[in-house]
Image (cartoon, grey):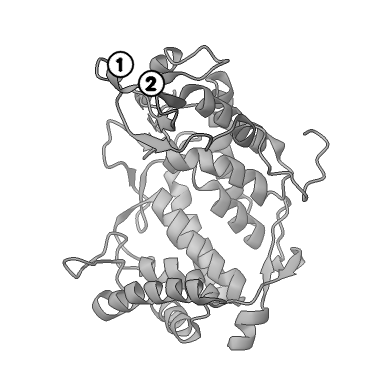
């Protein structure tokens, strides 16, 4: 297995869908495992947690480290094992990887009557199975990912926005808080994994479902200056159910995945890059400020889209000082950074094209 870990090619995806995974361009994987003392410390820390999970909760979904209790939030399908497969491989932990992969091949079953988070299941289980498949070449892992993807597609019922929860056995859909519906981060953080699943299997439905979400939200992103509220109902017509606008929970990874979706299409679908730039420009104008008198850069959130208008005009940032903040309703988190940490060019123009893109629209 050591030779496979060191030399197995890794798949890099183009924008086309490929029925035969072998037709996707290949590059060689760099040697895996710790290469210096600091990396060795990282592996040791990982093994501390891994061995605790293996001792107390092997085969279950998660270990609660303080109580040493186990969870079956996903029906006991071994989420922690699947989520860690690529890390085990890349850290060069051959024995641990072989044991974990063997458990998946022998025990993984989706015949569980439980409703799971579509978002969490996509990024942790579909993503984990796909990553392990592309590192190891094991087709059974890809088959498991496709089976799971088929079950998750049932979360799309009435339009482009999926439900938060889907039952893996019955296909029943729902939400933890039905009055709120689905979150921006959840519905906008499945596209990369579904894009890759379509590329690997030739089944275009996964890419199409994720794309429907972005077709819908991308147009709204342009209309609203790059920032969107965090909660919406999955049934048409669109209704925002929580007006908070934030880079924190329920909003965060939507903006992150805009850029990743451009990258995973081999930088060919430029609308994702443009949406990312629109979002970053909105973040810079509405969320990034500088404190007085210390001149620290910071990021905040706002209670509603209407409150964004109070943070404009668009051409300049707003400022904050401790005294005036006492009289303001500045809800949400604040992240403070050193002076000069964020430059305009870093946020909007970026360096993503440097040395590797042949785009002519920069």
Q: Are marks 1 and 2 in contact (CB under 8 Å)?
A: yes
Q: Position of residue 160 (x, y in %)?
A: 51, 35
332 to the left or right of 199: left
Q: Nearer the viewer, residue 45 or 61?
A: 45
Quarter residue 164 falls in: top left
Residue 353 in view: yes
Q: Secondary structure at mark 2?
A: strand
- Residue 154: x %, y % from top left: 44, 48
Q: What residue is at 40 percent from the left and 36 percent from the top?
A: 336
Asked which quadrant contains residue 102, the reply is bottom left
Q: Is residue 169 left or right of residue 273?
A: left
Q: Nearer the viewer, residue 13 or 244?
A: 244
Identified at 66% across, 44% down, the residue is 262
* SS assignment at label 1: helix
Indicate the position of residue 108 as horizontal and vertical percent values. Answer: 40, 73
Q: CA distance from mark 1 to mark 2?
A: 7 Å
Q: Is residue 5 above or below residue 193?
A: below
Residue 324 is labelled as 1
Q: Which residue is mark 2?
A: 320
The quarter of the picture where the C terminus appears is top right
Q: Position of residue 339 (x, y in %)?
A: 49, 34
Residue found at the far front of this picture: 293
Q: Is residue 5 left or right of residue 104?
A: right
Disc 1 crowd rating (10 Å Cα; few below 14, some 14-19, many 20+) is few
> Could you tell me which residue is drawn at 25 percent across and 19 percent down?
326
How many marks the image carries: the answer is 2
- Label 2 neighbourhood size at 10 Å, few (<14), some (14-19), many (20+)? some
Identify the mark at residue 291; answer none if there is no mark: none
């Amino acid at each position: 297995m050591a030779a496979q870990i060191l030399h197995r090619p890794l798949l890099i995806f183009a924008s086309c869908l490929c029925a035969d995974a072998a037709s996707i361009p290949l590059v060689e994987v760099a040697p895996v495992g710790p290469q210096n003392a600091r990396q060795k410390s990282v592996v040791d820390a990982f093994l501390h947690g891994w061995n605790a999970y293996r001792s107390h909760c092997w085969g279950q979904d998660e270990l609660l480290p303080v109580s040493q209790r186990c969870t079956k939030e996903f029906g006991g399908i071994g989420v922690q094992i699947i989520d860690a497969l690529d890390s085990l491989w890349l850290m060069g932990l051959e024995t641990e990887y072989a044991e974990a992969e063997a458990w998946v091949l022998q025990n993984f079953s989706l015949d569980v009557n439980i409703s799971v988070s579509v978002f969490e299941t996509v990024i942790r289980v579909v993503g984990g199975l796909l990553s392990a498949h592309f590192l190891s070449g094991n087709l059974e892992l890809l088959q498991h990912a496709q089976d799971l993807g088929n079950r998750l597609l049932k979360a799309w019922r009435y339009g482009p926005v999926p439900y938060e929860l889907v039952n893996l056995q019955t296909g029943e859909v729902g939400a933890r808080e039905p009055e709120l519906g689905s979150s921006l981060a959840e519905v906008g953080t499945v596209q990369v994994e579904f894009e890759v699943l379509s590329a690997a299997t030739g089944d275009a439905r996964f890419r199409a479902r994720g794309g429907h979400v972005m077709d819908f939200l991308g147009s709204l992103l342009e209309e609203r200056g790059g920032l969107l509220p965090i909660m919406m109902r999955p049934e048409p017509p669109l209704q925002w159910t929580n007006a908070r606008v934030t880079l924190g929970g329920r909003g965060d990874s939507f903006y992150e995945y805009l850029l990743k979706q451009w990258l995973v299409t081999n930088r060919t679908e430029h609308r994702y890059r443009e949406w990312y730039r629109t979002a970053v420009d909105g973040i810079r104008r509405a969320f990034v400020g500088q404190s007085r008198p210390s001149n620290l850069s910071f990021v905040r959130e706002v209670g509603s889209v209407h409150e964004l208008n109070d943070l404009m005009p668009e051409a300049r940032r707003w400022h904050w000082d401790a005294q005036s903040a006492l009289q303001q309703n500045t809800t949400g988190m604040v992240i403070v950074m050193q002076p000069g940490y964020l430059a305009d060019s870093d946020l909007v123009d970026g360096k993503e094209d440097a040395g590797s893109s042949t785009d002519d629209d920069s």
